[in-house]
Amino acid sequence: MISINDLLYQLHLADQASTRLFEKRLGISLTRYQMLQYLLSQGESSQIALKEILGIDQAALARHFKILEEEGYVTRQRNPLNQRESIVALTDFAREQLLTHPPLHHLSTKEQMESILTASESKELSRLLEKLVTGLEEVSPENRK
């Protein structure tokens, strides 16, 4: 049986490889890409909702949105019903880059990535990763005296 530390290290290596791939080939961090994908599927959203869904702390989320805003992918504005809350929306430029006219190398890279695992393997990996994350969150430190 493979030890948990070996599995976690393999997961770490997979994370590094996917991070490098996204940043080099797609020119965007995986986190920011996921934020854009969420906004694409859900429409505008509060920063708080994205924070909870993606599990990102508020400071990191604000930094990501600042970069996305500077690059023309999102707009942020105060919620008129709650001035302490920001509403984030995709720009037309972002929709064009993600849907209408995505760069060909983006499409090619995504196609290659999606072909690595079969649909059933992807589903099983997702299930296993969810189980692992849930289990790791439940690990409690031993009481030391």
Image: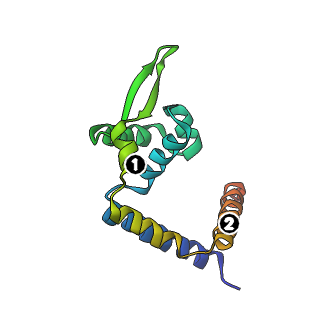
Does any portion of residue 145 appear in the rendered image? no
User: Image height check: is 117 above or below 37?
Assistant: below
- Name the image quarter holding residue 68: top left
Q: Is residue 107 left or right of residue 138?
A: left
Q: In this view, does 115 lie to the left or right of 140?
A: left
Neighbor class of circle 1 (other Cα within 10 Å; few <14, some 14-19, many 20+) is few
Mark 1: amino acid: Thr
What secondary structure is marked by label 2?
helix
What secondary structure is marked by label 1?
helix
Q: Is residue 26 left or right of residue 122?
A: left
Q: Nearer the viewer, mark 1 or mark 2?
A: 1
Residue under label 2, please give it. Answer: 123
- Residue 127 x %, y %: 70, 63
User: Image height check: is 15 above or below 45?
Assistant: below
- Residue 93 x %, y %: 33, 41
Q: Farthest bottom residue?
A: 1
Q: Earlier in the sequence, mark 1 or mark 2?
A: 1
Neighbor class of circle 2 (other Cα within 10 Å; few <14, some 14-19, many 20+) is few
Mark 2: amino acid: Lys
Residue under label 1, please give it. Answer: 100
- Residue 121 x %, y %: 66, 73
Q: Farthest left residue?
A: 70
Please give the label number shown on residue 139.
Answer: none
Mark 1 to mark 2: distance in Å? 28 Å
Q: In this view, does 15 lie to the left or right of 124?
A: left
